[in-house]
Image (cartoon, helix red, strand yellow):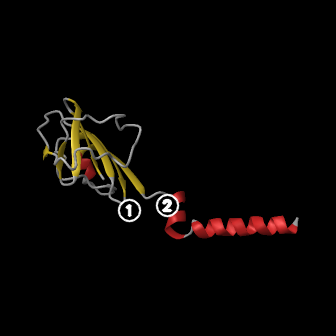
Amino acid sequence: MKRRALLAGLAAAGLVATLSGCTLANAITPPIETAVYATTPDSRAAGATLPLPSFVPDDAVMIRIKENSETGDAILVFGDGAPEPIGAPCDASEADSAPALDDTWWPQSIPTDGVTCIDGWHIFVLSATQFYGWKS
């Protein structure tokens, strides 16, 4: 019986050693940050937690952003009542990239055409005024 307890204790100690440091911290509290802004100016107000990419227009509304602060991976959605094209066609090597993050508001599938790139972001439009973007 004592031997079984000793083995269980050693196994637990091994697990703790394996999950020590950043790995344990990330398992308990992942380095994921999220923010929701009603408007672009709200994202610049005191207390705003995540900055928006420079391509998000000043008249954007209902902005959601999620970012992994360690890797820089991010997803974003915003509405724009007077949309203009964002970015340029993606390079062929980036065309089949996929986001590393997901969320309930993120679409289940990404269009195979119409994706543009700017500043490391991939941007697409699902409706006439709803922009989605990701960087990995």
> Looking at this view, is 72 or 56 the one in front?
72
Cα distance in 3D space between marks 1 and 2: 10 Å
* Mark drawn on residue 26: 2
Q: In the displayed structure, would residue 119 be above or below residue 6?
A: above
Name of the residue lying farthest toward the top: 127
Q: Residue at x 81, y 66 (%)?
A: 5
Q: Residue at x 69, y 65 (%)?
A: 12
The amino acid type, in three-letter code, at marker 1 is Glu
For label 2, the SS is helix
Name of the residue lying farthest toward the right: 1
Q: In the displayed structure, would residue 86 be above or below residue 3?
A: above
Quarter of the figure with residue 84 = top left
- Do the residues under discs 1 and 2 have CB atoms within 8 angstroms? yes
The amino acid type, in three-letter code, at marker 2 is Asn
Image coords of residue 96 (percent x, y): 26, 44
The first of marks 1 and 2 along the sequence is 2
> Looking at this view, is 96 or 116 the one in front?
96
Q: In the displayed structure, would residue 42 be above or below residue 71?
A: above
Residue at mark 1: 70
Q: Residue at x 58, y 67 (%)?
A: 18
